[in-house]
Image (cartoon, grey):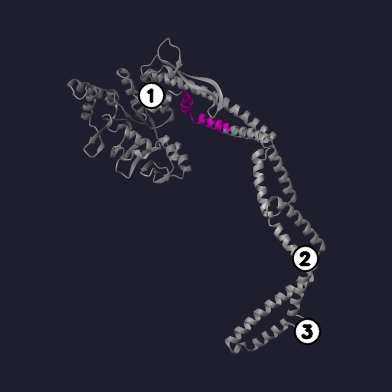
Amino acid sequence: MLLEISIKNFAIIEAISLNFEKGMTVLTGETGAGKSIVIDAMNLMLGARATTDVIRHGAPKAEIEGLFSVENRRLLQELFEEQGLELGDEIIIRREILQNGRSISRVNGQMINLSVLRTIGQHLVDIHGQHDQEELMRPQLHIQMLDEFGDAAFLELKQAYQTSFDAYRKMRKQVLEVKKNQQEHKSRIEMLEFQMAEIEAANLQAGEDLALNQERDKLLNHKNIADTLTNAYTMLDNEEFSSLANVRSAMNDMESVEEFDPEYREISSSLSETYYVLEDITKRLEDIIEDLDFDGNRLMQVENRLDLLNTITRKYGGTVDDVLLYFAKITDEYNLLTGNNLSSEDMEAELKKLEVNLVDLAGQLASARHDLAQQLEAEIKQELQDLYMEKAQFQVRFSKGKFSREGNETVEFYISTNPGEDLKPLVKVASGGELSRLMLAIKSAFSRKEGKTSIVFDEVDTGVSGRVAQAIAQKIHKIGQHGQVLAISHLPQVIAIADYQFFIEKISDEHSTVSTVRLLTLEERVEEVAKMLAGENVTEAALTQARELLQTREK
């Protein structure tokens, strides 16, 4: 339920704050005073798209903030957890529209994106206005309106169908693309197959050409390497002259005198380190020389392998690594042209499997929709009787259609408003007043089903008067008894039956125009209702009639 809304620098509103209660609240005022602007601000707060036009002239930004009490935690808990939001007993939503075109949305102080805000808003408030009546006149939207009447099990079934439909459509597109590609790119596919096979047969390893070239150079220079290593070993340690033995002797000499001077000790330590390093090098050279043997067969293998690598790299890239990159590239292209590694037969089999599942789910969805339609027809008929359309007949008609995300049937609402008349498409027979009552009947039925506690009606009583106006007033008030209804109306019957009335007026001077709002007392309400009945020249009769309307509300 909406407890409070604060609006700053929005259109002609400088700063207003409204506190709401349970029951029915109406917003009244002269045309252009800002009643609909309040609803527009509420829409923006709940995720509607905004432009900088809504910012009050001279202000840096527009701000809308709302405080909600949480009536149904179950519906919001999962959504809040997904977004990392904390859900308490109250929710604060804040939206700012900046002059640079950006908008900032926060829920309980945490920034969120617009789509998340819109989803949260759909759980909190249902705003109904003239736009909804326009949607009622668009048959292609009737199927979505019918589905809104469904429960959680129905919505789960519809989601399963849509998931299946998306998978089927994706696979069908892939199958068609593969067939098209196989025809249009046959020569390209054949060339890619040849190149991939040739590169795969080479069994390339990353960096292999560099390693083999280094090994070949080593084998070709075997004698020079062996002579050089042997000479190095001889210089370090042989029977006639041993550098290692000389260093060891010097090390022993320094160790015998190192205690006499710190500098001697440092020289002794350095000599020791040098000796052990040279000793290790000598040992390693000895081991290498012992194992050093020229392998002519290995040189031949390396040469043959390098010949193959050179052939491959000349055709496909500068180095083996370049060839491997090219191989990855043509593999991706090949997969794209041929269907992501699935053969045509495999894809056809998978498509058939998805088609069988889709048809089955479409049948289940259609059956559930037909049951839903019967429930909706009964609900709407009862609601229309309450709105003095007791002879009206309402029917949901189905016809077979192409498979889409909505199913394989189309839906259209039919209505007969007078006895003896055949049912005809709603878009062809409903008058403005009948459309208002039908939309109100649908909203009334949906309000009980959806469990929303805040519903906003923006001038839904257009085109009605007399007892019909009274019936509409009673219907709106009844909806408010189960939660909270906010309404903008010009009908005295609707205004009088409300539990609370806010009066919005526009104040202008030479420099600016602002809207103000105040909650009316009972006597002020009598005066306002009387003006609606008699105009500016309020008569005593109008005042008496206004009091009677307000007293009827109290009964």
Horizontal relation, residue 350 to residue 301: left or right: left
Which is more foreground, mark 2 or mark 3? 2
Q: Counting other residues with Cα less than 10 Å from the Cα at mark 2, is it few (<14), some (14-19), or many (20 or more)?
A: few
Report the side of 307 relative to 475 (left or right): right
C-alpha distance separating marks 1 and 2: 95 Å
Which residue matches tag 1?
440
Q: Residues within 10 Å of mark 1 (few under 14, many from 20)?
A: many
User: Regarding mark 1 in the picture, which secondary structure is present there?
Assistant: helix
Report which residue position mark 3 lands on.
Answer: 240
Tell me the element at label 3.
loop
- Seen at 32% across and 32% down, the residue is 36
Closer to the camera, 128 or 189? 189
Residue denoted by label 2: 220
Of the residues tagged 3 and 1, which is closer to the observer?
Answer: 3
Q: Against 353, is 388 above or below?
A: above
279, above or below 355, in the image: below
Q: Measuring from the top left, give residue 86's x and y in whole percent.
A: 43, 44
Is 375 in front, or is 59? Answer: 59
Kindly check if marks 3 and 1 are in contact, taking CB atoms under 8 A apart as contact.
no
Farthest-out residue, top: 420
Q: Amino acid at mark 1?
A: Leu
Q: Nearer the viewer, mark 1 or mark 2?
A: 2
User: Could you tell me how far apart the alpha carbons at marks 3 and 1 are, in whole angstroms?
Assistant: 116 Å
Gap in angstroms between the C-alphas marked 2 and 3: 32 Å
Magenta residues (range)? 139-165
**Is residue 130 left or right of 82 when viewed as pictured?**
left
Q: How far across and how far down the image is residue 366, in percent?
A: 54, 24
Q: Residue furthest front?
A: 314
Q: Determine if the magenta segment contains residue 148.
A: yes
Q: Is residue 389 magenta?
A: no
Residue 502, picture quadrant: top left
Q: Amino acid at mark 2?
A: Leu
